[in-house]
Amino acid sequence: MSTFSAPKGTYDLLPPDSAAVLAVREALAAPLRAAGYGYAETPGFEHVELFSRGVGESTDIVTKEMYTLTTKGGTRLALRPEGTASVLRATLQANLHRAGNLPVKLWYSGTYYRYERPQAGRYRHFSQIGAEAIGTEDPALDAELIILAADAYRSLGLTGVRLLLNSLGDRACRPAYRTALQDFLRGLDLDEETRARIEVNPLRVLDDKRESVRRQLAGAPAMRDHLCEACKEYHEQVRELLTDAGVAFTDDERLVRGLDYYTRTTFEFVHDGLGSQSAVGGGGRYDGLSEMLGGPPLPSVGWAIGVDRTLLALRAEGAAPAAAPATDVFAVPLGDRARRELFTVVTALRRAGVAADFGYGGRGVKSAMKSANRSGARFALVAGERDLADGVVQLKDLGSGEQTPVALPDVVEDLRRRLG
Ligand code: ATP
Ligand code: MG
């Protein structure tokens, strides 16, 4: 123990658990790369206004959860609470959205910051993989993103992820629904804060998790009954494409995002093994966001998946991804001359693409062999004075215990062949 520990709501990722996190990130990212999404990286902090506009003044993220700071120069910055606003800002700034280049398909991976009440699956510093398809309105794009996420969960071996799907309508049909919903909500028995929310962000009230509120929402008007023809048709196409791909979903009237620039398709992936932090990922269309940020109309769709919660879901299913052993060969030198010769061999192995490690610290053979076994390596290379005098090293198969002398100049080739 030192005098310090990690701040509340954060945790350290260390071996061996950290290998599973890398495996989860890779499983989520690989399908995106293969589907034409390019990697994007944006700063860990941005101007506060990007998020207050791009996430929404009336959202919990902006009103309660943002870490803000003022620099010595007087600039107001915020640690990023999410990725979409930054990625869209970067796209607009670099002018990636010029004609002929649409959709701009980007993926990202990083850590995000929200001042929340820490609990299992809810941290103040957490990790997401996200994907955005910017500048094109096409139900196949919505379906593509949802299918990529669903397949990625499956490739991890997760069986308990459920997809919830809804449409939020658009500029044509949502205003009338919003008014109808407000009329309904104003008649309910709600606390002061929730009553205020009805006026600025009524759709969010549908998302209230409290039982006392949920009970009263039973008869709330549904967006489904207010969708215009174009939105109905669009949503039907998304549903058909998902069905064709064998991706199961549940229509969920209560699934909302409260802001006007979120339109049409909205979805969430939930897992029932996570208690109340059930959302492992979510996303949807945000056709009006670019204009909110001062850009041209760029209808877009995206999602963000929580890496931490995906890993918790895997653990809940007893299916944490097994990390492949990192080391194939472990070298155990006995004496100073062997140290020098074997270190050269290890370097040559690494340069030849063989994962190799070394018994450092001049320890005895017993303790070095223990390290070799712990490393998960398939082979140990052992050499002492006599071996080197004979021009060989002993190659030990750590599974079978079998030991064979190999001529020093042949070691790299020999091991490469054995490891396939
Ligand atoms: P929740 O309703 O659980 O607060 P959210 O709607 O705030 O989720 P998004 O902003 O859509 O979540 O973020 C996408 C994903 O990021 C979530 O589905 C979740 O898996 C993960 N996530 C969000 N906030 C946290 C957090 N504080 N700690 C860990 N993971 C988080
Ligand atoms: Mg949240």
Image: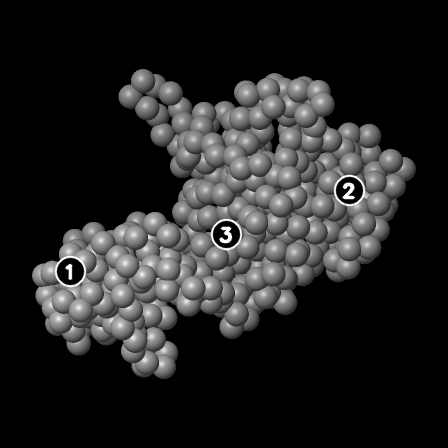
The local secondary structure at tag 2 comes to helix
CA gap between label 3 and label 2 equals 25 Å
Find out whether the residues at labels 3 and 1 contact each other: C-beta distance under 8 Å.
no
Tell me the residue at 51%/52% (across/down): 26
**In the visual, does 254 lie left or right of 211?**
right
**In the visual, does 61 lie left or right of 290?**
left
Tell me the residue at 21%/56% (across/down): 343
What's under tag 2, amino acid-wise? Answer: Ala
Tell me the residue at 46%/43% (across/down): 110
Q: Earlier in the sequence, mark 3 or mark 2?
A: 3
The local secondary structure at tag 1 comes to helix
* Colour scheme shown: one colour
Rendered view: 388 above or below 67 = below
Assess disc 2: are there few (<14), some (14-19) or many (≥20) residues with their C-alpha within 10 Å of its C-alpha: some
The local secondary structure at tag 3 comes to helix
Assess disc 1: are there few (<14), some (14-19) or many (≥20) residues with their C-alpha within 10 Å of its C-alpha: many
Which residue, as the protein is rendered here, is positioned at the far front? 390
Q: Closer to the observer: label 3 or label 1?
A: 1
Between 321 and 253, the one nearer to me in the picture: 321
Q: Earlier in the sequence, mark 3 or mark 1?
A: 3
| Residue tagged 2 | 140
Question: Residue 122, how many percent across, how many down?
Answer: 46, 54
The answer to which quarter of the image holds residue 226 is top right
| Residue tagged 1 | 339
As drawn, the label of residue 172 is none
Question: Residue 4, how many percent across, how many down?
Answer: 20, 52
Q: Confirm whether residue 288 shows in the render.
A: no
Find out whether the residues at labels 2 and 1 contact each other: C-beta distance under 8 Å.
no
Rendered view: 366 above or below 175 = below
Q: Closer to the observer: label 2 or label 1?
A: 1
Question: Residue 113, how many percent across, how many down?
Answer: 43, 42
